[in-house]
Amino acid sequence: MVQQVFGGKSWRDDPLLMPRMEKAFRVMRKLHEAVLLLQEAARFPLTSVHEQQRQELLTALDAAKPRGEADLAAFEDAAILKEIRTFLTKLRDTPAIRQRHR
């Protein structure tokens, strides 16, 4: 990320970059956590509809992925992250998944 987003610059060389880099790492962590959660959801007995939604969310997440520093602020509150939370919450309430975790 340092190479792509900040062109290889370091906060050690430019301490003013530290707040921007911290924010960038926070946003990228959200992105990676969302991908991981969607990948882990594949381990559950998903209906074909849920699996299709999961795949669509992964595709949308990849398309919305921030490519530079300017994209990061917009991505932090991106609608796709809210959609993923809603999807995962709905999964939690499905009988097959609820029973698997008893």
Image (cartoon, helix red, strand yellow):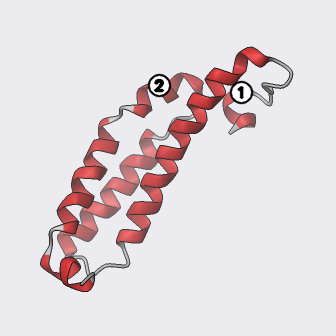
Position of residue 31 relative to residue 89, above or below, is above
The part of the image, by quadrant, that contains residue 74 is top left
In the image, 43 versus 68, the foreground residue is 43
- Disc 2/disc 1 C-alpha distance (Å): 14 Å
Residue 6 marker: 1
The part of the image, by quadrant, that contains residue 45 is bottom left
The part of the image, by quadrant, that contains residue 94 is bottom left
Query: Residue 86: x percent and y percent?
Result: 22, 52
Is disc 2 placed on a helix, strand or loop?
helix
Residue 43 marker: none
Residue ID at (54%, 37%): 26
Label 1 sits on what residue type? Phe
Q: Quadrant of the N terminus?
A: top right
Position of residue 4 relative to residue 74, above or below, is below
Residue ID at (58%, 32%): 24
Residue 73 marker: 2
Q: Residue furthest front?
A: 102
Circles 2 and 1 in contact, beta carbons < 8 Å: no
Query: Residue 23: x percent and y percent?
Result: 56, 29
In the image, 30 versus 71, the foreground residue is 30
Residue ID at (70%, 35%): 4
Label 2 sits on what residue type? Ala
Is disc 1 placed on a helix, strand or loop?
helix
Q: In the displayed structure, does residue 77 sit left or right of residue 31? A: left
Q: Quadrant of the C terminus?
A: bottom left
Query: Residue 41: x percent and y percent?
Result: 35, 70
Position of residue 38 relative to residue 77, above or below, is below
